Each structure stands twice: as structure tokens, then as C-alpha cells.
Image: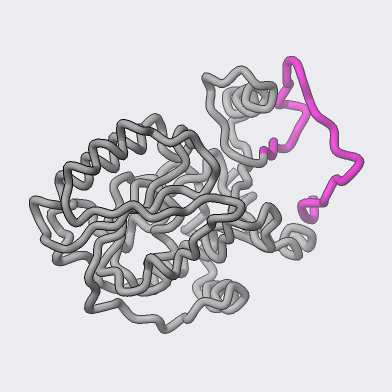
């Protein structure tokens, strides 16, 4: 196999019992939940349970845009899509690749860490999302607010995930008991709030496994990551008690790694992606 070819109309959906010996590997797009009964969840579940190794595509980690369904880059991991579960092939890292990826995504490669700010930003996630791995995002947000107040007097801003959702009324009622906490409005399609507005003058961000952690670090804003699946885990603090003294160390090693987690469309066509990921299969 010289590369990963776009199948287009030739693509075939395999249903029923899969014989993994007939295929080099399997490729799935998007995450899945094993308990969901929808066909696409069950097919992906069967693939993950049947194949020793499979390739998983997801939304990119660098250069994401909530308004887009089709990105130039796609995240590519083996047997997963989160930092601590996928095989990313970091032992085969091209240490210069990050310069190209950041340039493609219009990211300042020399962005330093922010040294000031007036609020702590909590980035929520889509309730029930696979990246939460069963965590209730509303409970996590409330617990995070309560713990943060023990370690900082800074204002706390909560940014909901922009996908349309049913509001958790009890969540917002409980937040009213906390002073200096605000929840901003952020919802697709008409009320999407640019992330830069909440990054503006932020002291640090708090994330569970949200991709906003990557955006934060790339913008020079320190991050506290609360789950090992967080794609910015290596360049984040991991305890809320560190809120006044978050990680602001070296980022280059992480940039070199994170750039190996996504490939663009041309790299899918010309075999660059396959050349890298096949080493982890």
C-alpha cells in the first residue's frame, strides 16, 4: 500500500461479522460510545473489539473551527483519539514538522506564556461526549468552581460548549450561589462566541479533555488539565491548587509531538500520513 486513498463512491460499509484477517487494518471516522445502539456506534465498537489495531480519524487538535464540518487537517491516531489512549508514533516524530503545521494553521510559533490576566476560564464540553469518558460535565464544572474558590480570588468565567443542547436548569441555579462567576452565551449557529473573546485577559484555562486546552496553550495561556486524555496534558498543570502558579515551562517537545497527531488532505493522498501511522499498527 503506497498511501491512504480516498475511496469516494467505492467505499463499502461492512456490516455483520467482520473477519479481520481479510484486511490490513480498519479505519473509522469519529468517536463512538459502546452503549449506544445506533448502527454507526455498533459498527465502530465491533471494529475496535475485533481488530488488533485500527486507525481512528477525528477533528484536528490544531486549527479547529467550531463552524466547520470539513477541516483541512484531521486527527489520526491508532486505537484511539485521546492523548493517553491512542498510539501516536511519537517515537518516530519528525522534529521539524511542527513548524509547517503551525504555519499552515496560522499559529505564532514563538508565542510566549502570558504573565497576567484577571479571570480563570472554565471550558465546558458537549454533555455526553465520548472524550469525557463518562464524566458529567455539569458536575465537573460545579466541582471545579467550588475547588477554585479555595485557591484563587480571581473572577471565574464559564464557557459552555457551542453545540445546541438542553440547558441543565439545576446547574445554573447552583451557580447563582457563587459570587464572581459568570456563564457566557455560546451556541451555534447564531450565538457562537469567538474563543478569543474569552481568552482576552484570561489568567489561565481549566479543561477536562476539551480541545480548547490546545488552543489555550498555543495562545500562550496556561492551562490546567483535569484528565490524562487531554491533548495538552504534557504542557499543563494537573491540580486546581496550582491555579496561581500554573505550568509555564518549555513547549517545543509537546509541539513536536502534537504536530504528529494530525495530517492534511494532501498528506492523506500522497502517503505521508500512512507512512507515519503504519509504524504504530
Toward the right, the furthest residue is: 9
Please tell me which residue is depicted at 34% across the width and 52% down the height of the picture.
183
Q: Residue 186 versus residue 146: which sits nearer the camera?
A: 186
Please tell me which residue is depicted at 18% across the width and 52% down the height of the picture.
240
Our reading of the magenta stretch's main secondary structure is loop
Q: Position of residue 256 (x, y in %)?
A: 46, 69
Task: Let me know if residue 14 is in the magenta part.
Answer: yes
Q: Is residue 149 left or right of residue 214?
A: left
Task: Let me know if residue 126 is in the magenta part.
Answer: no
Q: Is residue 281 left or right of residue 184?
A: right
Q: Residue 174 versus residue 33: which sits nearer the camera?
A: 174
Q: Is residue 268 left or right of residue 83?
A: right
Q: Position of residue 191 (x, y in %)?
A: 54, 55
Q: Position of residue 64 (x, y in %)?
A: 56, 61
**Which of the image's four quarters has the C terminus?**
top right
Toward the bottom, the furthest residue is: 110
Toward the left, the furthest residue is: 150
Please tell me which residue is depicted at 21% across the width and 40% down the height of the picture.
143
Q: Residue 169 versus residue 207: which sits nearer the camera?
A: 169
Q: Which residues are magenta?
A: 1-28
Which quarter of the picture shows residue 134?
A: top left
Vertical position of residue 262 compared to residue 226: above or below? below
Which quarter of the picture shows residue 227?
A: top left
Which quarter of the picture shows residue 138?
A: top left
Vertical position of residue 82 compared to residue 116: above or below? above
Q: Position of residue 249 (x, y in %)?
A: 26, 72
Please tell me which residue is depicted at 44% across the width and 70% down the height of the picture.
196
Q: Is residue 39 left or right of residue 132?
A: right
The type of colouring in the image is one colour
Amino acid at each position: 500500500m503506497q498511501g491512504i486513498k480516498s475511496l469516494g463512491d467505492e467505499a463499502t460499509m461492512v456490516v455483520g461479522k467482520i473477519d479481520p484477517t481479510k484486511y490490513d487494518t480498519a479505519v473509522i471516522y469519529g468517536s463512538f460510545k459502546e452503549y449506544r445502539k445506533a448502527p454507526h456506534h455498533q459498527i465502530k465498537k465491533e471494529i475496535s473489539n475485533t481488530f488488533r489495531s485500527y486507525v481512528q480519524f477525528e477533528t484536528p487538535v490544531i486549527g479547529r473551527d467550531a463552524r466547520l464540518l470539513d477541516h483541512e487537517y484531521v486527527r489520526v491516531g491508532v486505537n484511539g483519539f485521546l492523548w493517553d489512549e491512542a498510539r501516536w508514533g511519537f517515537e518516530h516524530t519528525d522534529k521539524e514538522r511542527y513548524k509547517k503545521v503551525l504555519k499552515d494553521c496560522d499559529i505564532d510559533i514563538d508565542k510566549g506564556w502570558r504573565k497576567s490576566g484577571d479571570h480563570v476560564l472554565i471550558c465546558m464540553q458537549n454533555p455526553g461526549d465520548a472524550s469525557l469518558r463518562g464524566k458529567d460535565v455539569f458536575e465537573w464544572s460545579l466541582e471545579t468552581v467550588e475547588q477554585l474558590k479555595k485557591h484563587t480570588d480571581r473572577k471565574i468565567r464559564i464557557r459552555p460548549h457551542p453545540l445546541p443542547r438542553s440547558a441543565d436548569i439545576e446547574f445554573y441555579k447552583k451557580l447563582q450561589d457563587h459570587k464572581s462567576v459568570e456563564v457566557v452565551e455560546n451556541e451555534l449557529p447564531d450565538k457562537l462566541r469567538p474563543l478569543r473573546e474569552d481568552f482576552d485577559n484570561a489568567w489561565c484555562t481549566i479543561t477536562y479533555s476539551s480541545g480548547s486546552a490546545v488552543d489555550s496553550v498555543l495562545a500562550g495561556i496556561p492551562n490546567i488539565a483535569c484528565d490524562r486524555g487531554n491533548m495538552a496534558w504534557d504542557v499543563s498543570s494537573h491540580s486546581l491548587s496550582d491555579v496561581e502558579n500554573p505550568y509555564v515551562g518549555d513547549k517545543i517537545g509537546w509541539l513536536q509531538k502534537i504536530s504528529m497527531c494530525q495530517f492534511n488532505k494532501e498528506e492523506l493522498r500522497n502517503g505521508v500520513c500512512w507512512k507515519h501511522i503504519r509504524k504504530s499498527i
